[in-house]
Image (cartoon, rainbow, N blue to C red):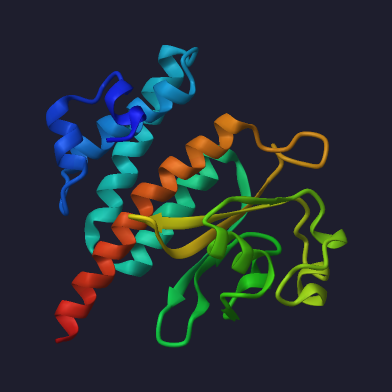
Amino acid sequence: VPRVFVCALDTTERDIREISSPSPSNAARSRWMVGMSLEAFPDMSGDLLATERALLDATLALSERLDVAETCDALLGVVERLFDARSTWILLHDPSTDELVTAAYRGPGADAFGNVRIPCDRGIVGLAFRRREPVFVPDAHQDDRWFDAQRVHRSELMSVITLPLVVKSQAIGVIGLQSSRFNADVPPSGHDIARLQAIAAIAGAEIRNSRLHEAIEAD
């Protein structure tokens, strides 16, 4: 069991077992998520912790609708609120073609990732997906590693973070965001990345479950 589960202050041994199960409850996931915040931010104020708890409870409730589109929309919403993200987007892996395909996007410049299919070995999104690691681009207009550099350079995007959605060591997609909090002079901190990864872990599991549910319904 990862150390963070054991040390999370609001997480009980029962929660640890449940969060590792195929269908953990919202309550267990929420307590685990709050514990992640406490672990990453030991000096977090009571007011801020209460705000995060309420926000995460609401997000988990939204993402329980077992619909991939609604789950992705809920993920964009929580990232926008927690990180003051101006633009957000999600691409999900299509195993049949080994491409990253647009699932949702919104905000100025996010249309650079709208309605695209990107081979998993191309661009910044492919890099984050393959390495299972976040990639921060301080100036999107000066980076030529994009899947379509001219398309991104024409957009309103500035500093961009791309993070893989990983479930049990398997990458299922990526989420990207632009926030005024981050730029070349103020890159995302380790705490910022830890919080994003925690949110992405829960969202990734929800998306996987939604896909399974939709596949069962289709049969």
Quadrant in the rendering for residue 87:
bottom right
The residue at the far right in this view is 142
Whether residue 89 is visible, yes or no, is no
Vertical side of 204 occupied by 40: above or below: above
Left or right for 209, reference 97: left
| Residue 62, percent from left and from top | 29, 52
Residue at x 23% of width, y 55% of height: 64
Residue at x 21% of width, y 44% of height: 20
Vertical side of 14 occupied by 50: above or below: above
| Residue 93, percent from left and from top | 45, 73
User: How many numbered marks appear?
Assistant: 0
Left or right for 105, reference 112: left
The residue nearer to you, when weighing 203 against 166, is 166
Vertical side of 79 occupied by 171: above or below: below
The residue nearer to you, when weighing 1 against 218, is 1
In what quadrant of the picture does the C terminus appear?
Answer: bottom left
In what quadrant of the picture does the N terminus appear?
Answer: top left
| Residue 218, percent from left and from top | 18, 85
Quadrant in the rendering for residue 3:
top left
Residue at x 54% of width, y 46% of height: 80
Whether residue 178 is visible, yes or no, is yes
Vertical side of 96 occupied by 206: above or below: above
Left or right for 195, reference 60: right
| Residue 181, percent from left and from top | 69, 37
Quadrant in the rendering for residue 207:
bottom left
Residue at x 78% of width, y 61% of height: 156
